Amino acid sequence: MGGMQRVVVIGGSAGSFQGVVNILRSLPRSYPFALLLCLHRLKHVRSGFVEALSLKSNLPVVEPCDKDIMRGGVAYLAPANYHMLVEFGNKIVLSTEAPVHHSRPSIDLTFYAVSRAYRNRAVGVLLSGANRDGALGMARLKAGGGYSMVQDPALCDVPAMTRAALAETEVDMVGSCEMIVARLNEMAKEGYGEK
Amino acid sequence: MEKQPFNIGLKETREVVSDVREYYGVNFDGWSMPHLMMRLNAVMDYYGYRVVDQLRNRLIRNFTQGRGYFEEFLDLLLVRSTELFRDPSFWRVMSEQVLPMLGRESENGGVRCVVCNNDSGEELFSLLIVLEELGMLDKSHITVCYASEPRRERIERGELQEQQDEVESANYVRYHPTGTLDKWVEQRKDGRFLARELLTRVEYQRETCEPQLLDYEGVFDLALCRNQFLYYGVRSVEKQLAGLHRALRAGGILAVGVCERLDNVRISGKFTTVNGEERIYKRSGV
């Protein structure tokens, strides 16, 4: 992918699986941005999740290894029991740092890392979940010039995560997964973040 | 108030790296930058510092007071967090296949192992438990690398993290469904500890944060280096791998983390895959 890449982080926990599936099957195969899926998951289950998402996704879904290079149009699922960060050069780096909000992977850490590396080319999406992981990270992403979207808490199976984010910062959009997909597609057409 | 990582900037990180090189002769250039920034942030949180200059002043001021403060800094800098029997399926493969194979290849049925992690000792402790369960520990030699004295002292005491009790017990049961971790862990007044007798065959080797095992050639049957390379850039990983390759005997086994791989580094041709899923490799004879 030429030039600097745009990166979308999708964070979710309890109740977010269907939302993630809706997004992945609605984005076109030609979607240009890399997606980082930071989803709370059972730490000891290393297989099955990426397969379940892949079945329903238009985009390839992979679990990255450390130092893999991100490519546009691919969804990268944070491996079980690792935090997923990014480094300059579109590189994914993993970590065994302590859990954050009892979570590893932590959505906050992915948001922080992407915001630092991509600034106004970072896009954050937060879906249903039962704790506040992602709230501070979303605020940081927004403060760094990134674009922030939160699933409407009224539409979440478990609204605690999205409510926490809304309490922490004024996000750019609150809506359904369909609205989130529509906005992601608009960004791709706009060349979002490109100077 | 919730702590936030990444408050330290790139320029500030480079300033700290430069100070450490100048005053202590230690080079952090091989670190992966996001990790170094997170760790420095954690150090600042520990000391209650809000600006990097406070940390820099401490490092420079303490230089004249001896190495003790720097050892503490190193200990805080290195990632501690792992868990006993992390990746239980890996440890099952080690117990059922790899270690018995290595034992059969050796003259006395034991193995010579090196553990290269900068973690808090859990990889070493897990290995000791498995060797003891196989009846191989008393015939084996285990060398553990360490980069800071406080870290070595904790490992020597067999210190475990209190809050990991439940997680580690669950990991152990996944590794050994009919067993219990309680057999190997002592609950004392001052915390959780590995059973003392398991640590008697361990030797301690001081290395830098990026161990290169320069004192060893063709010595080890097994090198455990799981989730160590995550924290370093590719060039540093290549150097560390070169050291491991030299230190292992031909046919010796290298294990890295299940989300690490060797095929993105130049030395990868010197190892063949034994178990791709668990990232277990064999040193070729070349």
Image (spheres, coloured by chain):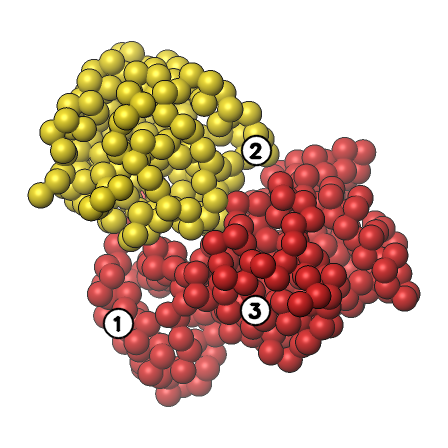
Chain colours: A yellow, B red
Report in which chain the residue with disc 1 lies. Answer: B
Amino acid type at image mark 3: Ala
Residue placed under numbered mark 3 in the picture: B242
Q: Residues within 10 Å of mark 2 (few under 14, many from 20)?
A: some
Q: Secondary structure at mark 1?
A: helix
Report in which chain the residue with disc 3 lies. Answer: B
Amino acid type at image mark 1: Glu
Whether B87 is drawn above or below B124: the answer is above
Whether A173 is drawn above or below A194: the answer is above
Q: Residue furthest right?
A: B108
Q: Which of B279 and A17 lies nearest the eye of the viewer?
A: B279
Say whether mark 1 and mark 2 are on the same chain. Answer: no
Say whether mark 1 and mark 3 are on the same chain. Answer: yes
Q: Nearer the viewer, mark 3 or mark 1?
A: 3
Considering only order in the chain, which callout, 1 or 3, is on the residue closer to the N terminus? 1
Residue B255's quadrant in the figure?
Answer: bottom right
Task: Measuring from the top left, give residue B47's x and y in whole percent.
Answer: 35, 63
Q: Nearer the viewer, mark 3 or mark 2?
A: 3
Quadrant into which the C terminus of chain B falls: bottom right
* Residue at the image position 40 percent from the left and 75 percent from the top: B27
* Residue at the image position 31 percent from the left and 31 percent from the top: A73
Q: Which mark is residue A41?
A: none
Task: Measuring from the top left, give residue A131's x and y in whole percent.
Answer: 38, 28
Q: Residues within 10 Å of mark 1 (few under 14, many from 20)?
A: some
Say whether mark 2 and mark 3 are on the same chain. Answer: no
Residue placed under numbered mark 1 in the picture: B15
Task: Measuring from the top left, give residue A78's x and y in whole percent.
Answer: 44, 36
Q: Is residue B253 visible?
A: yes
Q: Which of B148 and B158 lies nearest the eye of the viewer?
A: B148
Q: Is residue A179 left or right of residue B179?
A: left
